[in-house]
Amino acid sequence: MFQRAGEMIKIFAEQRLSDFLDERLNRLRQEVQNQDTNYLLNVNETSFIDYLVNRYQVELLVFYWDQISVSYCEKPIPAELFPPSFHVRPGKSYPGQVITYHLPFSGDKELLKCQPSRYIMWTKDIRLEGDCVCFDVINWQDDAEAIKREADNIIGYIRRQAENVSKEVLEFNSRLEKETQQLVQSRKAYILKQENLVASLGVPVRKAGQVPPTFSIPITKKNIIVKKPDAPTSPFMPEPTLDEEVYQEILKIIYETGIEMERHPSIYKDKDREVLRDHFIMVLSPHFESATGETFNKSGKTDILIRHEKQNIFIAECKFWKGIKMFYDTIDQLLGYLTWRDSKAAIVCFVKNKELDPVLKTIEQEIVKHSCFIKYYGKKKEGWFMFEFHLKDDPTRSVKLAVLCFHFP
């Protein structure tokens, strides 16, 4: 309306929000496509996806409705803006009082220009002055109530349009991680196919043909800036990985075995961790076999191992809960045993405390403070958590870590 400092825009009406979001997704695709191939193959995939999601998700608009303020001044008002009841000459300007409303906001200011898919047929010329949306109301009749009604009407339209924008942006952000994961994984698969490489050689672990029914376990129902992760750009070398499906089946058997043991105190009462560990190995061994015949090995006092080419590719530690510090030490111990990229691990935690829930809450809340923590994937079942860590000396090499807790009071 009036020439003042600040960018003039037609609020929520200058471009389609769907076009704005599509353009953002296209830039994401382009970044993945243009990424150095060896970087993409070597980088920790979870960290890279988190970086991309944080880089391309859209920061929501937030208006601070309770912090609206006003200012006023006298300005020359063009005759064309006057109501018909005023006698003014076209082409002339007349002095009048202009009241400016200042509405603070935060978030991506480009969204102020975007028309949502579901929208109201309304817009208004506003100014962007720093972190405020500013609009003017002219005092025509020295009527405070009329000025307030006009301002409230404008604020109401802004609020409703902003809600529609936020809904669409939230939908975009909620699906961004899945789409980013698909883009990265598809690009990696294409590169490997082109170079005739196989990223996962696969550990020779397969389900045994016959499993004695004796061992069948019943199933129990149940805005931060992220730095782009570093990765070497040296030629990618494929390494063995334990198949995810096999890993999850191992964990499922461990979980079901532990739940069954919880129901029979005679199995765990007064038993040391080596005896309890051997019970899990006894149940696991008939379900899987390997080319070496040593799918589950005992090393030292507590380890359950799968080895390939003299390296550990899966390891589980059986420990009694003795507080978070000892738990951190167990994680360090596990990470020290592993060298392959995308290794798999588990901590089988025997809880002797009277109450189990406080221990579960401590693990869920405190494990994220470990220096090698990457991501928390949530609970699979009660007492079964899934995390991702990286090796101490190499953040590009990730370790999937399951924590399975059993109550042996």
Image: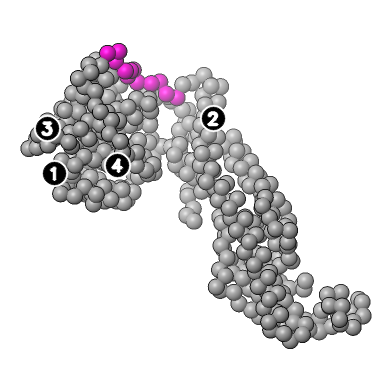
Foreground residue, 290 or 239?
290
Task: Give the CA separation, mark 4 to mark 3.
Answer: 21 Å
Residue ranking furthest to the bottom: 142
At label 2, the amino acid type is: Ser
At label 1, the amino acid type is: Pro
Write down the residue under mark 3: 267
The mark nearer the N terminus, 2 or 1, is: 2
**Label 1 crowd (10 A; few <14 / some 14-19 / many >=20):** some
4 vs 349: above or below: below
Label 1 sits on a secondary structure element that is: loop
Write down the residue under mark 2: 186
Task: Give the CA separation, mark 3 to mark 2.
Answer: 47 Å
Question: Which is closer to the viewer, label 2 or label 1?
Answer: 1
At label 3, the amino acid type is: Ile
Query: Dividing the image into 4 quarters, which one contains the N terminus?
Result: bottom right
The mark nearer the N terminus, 4 or 2, is: 2
Task: Give the CA separation, mark 2 to mark 1.
Answer: 48 Å
Foreground residue, 144 or 393?
144
Question: Which of the 4 quarters of the picture holds residue 402?
Answer: top left
Left or right: where 22 falls relative to 367? right
Left or right: where 305 falls relative to 28? left
For the point 12% across and 37% down, the residue is 265
Where is residue 202 drawn, in percent x and y?
Answer: 38, 21
**Label 4 crowd (10 A; few <14 / some 14-19 / many >=20):** some
Question: Which is closer to the viewer, label 3 or label 2?
Answer: 3
The mark nearer the N terminus, 1 or 3, is: 3
Label pair 4/1, CB-CB below 8 angstroms: no
4 vs 296: above or below: below
- Residue 203 covered by magenta stretch: yes
